Image (cartoon, helix red, strand yellow):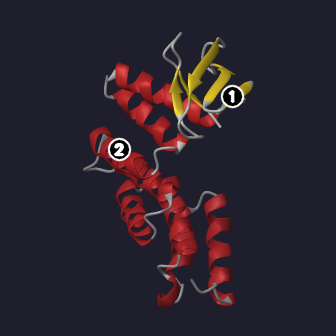
Amino acid sequence: MRPLDRTTELSRSAALGWMDLGNCQEAICELDHIAPRFLRHPEILELRWLIYVKAKKWDLACDVAKILRNTKPDNPNYWIWLACATRDKSSGGLVAACKILGKAHKLFPKDATIVEGLACYSYQLGKLDRAQKFMKTAIALSHPVKIKNRKGSMVFFDCSACGKGVETFIGKWGSIIDCPHCGGKTKVQ
């Protein structure tokens, strides 16, 4: 991706300033002055998304998030942004947002923010068991444990949920292990 030219960088900076001052309309006007060749530049699209979110223009934020996600589907943040905007847009909702994060979770199973989002949406939808499962996984992904001792494939560690000692065989580092004591999830690295 080519870098922004000076004029575009100045418009971007002015838009950011207007947004920080709370004047989202002026911020959008600044972005509308940008040369067409830079309108789909990720830095410009990201700023446009932030302005739309701050202005609570969820339908427009969703449109921008779709462009970003489609342009760079390997960036988990764009999936998260799309889910957030979809949740609040006029024809969106929790179910649609949850579906987006579900697809993202298949692509990024170790992204704690996506898993936490699934926990929150599941809770809001009244799916408490599912929410609890996702939250335990999110905690495990966010707080991996340190191995106390290792002998070959056998590892010894304290569960991040209950603190009790666990000994188990592990096939792959970075795996998530269910604690036999509390059922909590722990990421082993």
Q: Which mark is residue 151?
A: 1
Q: Position of residue 172 (x, y in %)?
A: 55, 40
Q: Quadrant of residue 43?
A: bottom right
155 and 69: which one is in front? 155
Q: Are marks 1 and 2 in contact (CB under 8 Å)?
A: no
Extreme residue toward the right, this view: 148
Determine crowd level at label 1: few under 14, some 14-19, many 20+ residues with C-alpha closer than 10 A.
Answer: few
Q: Which mark is residue 102?
A: 2
Q: Quadrant of the N terminus?
A: bottom right
Mark 2 belongs to which amino acid?
Answer: Gly
Q: Position of residue 4 (x, y in %)?
A: 63, 84
Q: Is residue 157 left or right of 139 when viewed as pictured?
A: right
Pointer 1 or 2: first along the chain: 2
Q: Position of residue 119 (x, y in %)?
A: 43, 31
Determine crowd level at label 2: few under 14, some 14-19, many 20+ residues with C-alpha closer than 10 A.
Answer: some
Q: State whether residue 89 is above or below residue 46.
A: above
SS for dot 2: helix
Q: Is residue 108 left or right of 43 when viewed as pictured?
A: left
User: What residue appears at the point 54 percent right and 85 percent down from the top-left corner?
Assistant: 34
37 and 15: which one is in front? 37
Residue 76 appears in the picture as rendered: yes
Q: State whether residue 87 is above or below residue 25.
A: above
Q: Position of residue 85 (x, y in %)?
A: 40, 52
Q: Quadrant of residue 130?
A: top left
Residue 88 appears in the picture as rendered: no
User: What residue appears at the point 68 percent right and 74 percent down from the top-left corner?
Assistant: 13
Q: State whether residue 157 is above or below residue 2.
A: above
User: What residue appears at the point 74 percent right and 24 percent down from the top-left corner?
Assistant: 148
Gap in angstroms between the C-alphas marked 1 and 2: 36 Å
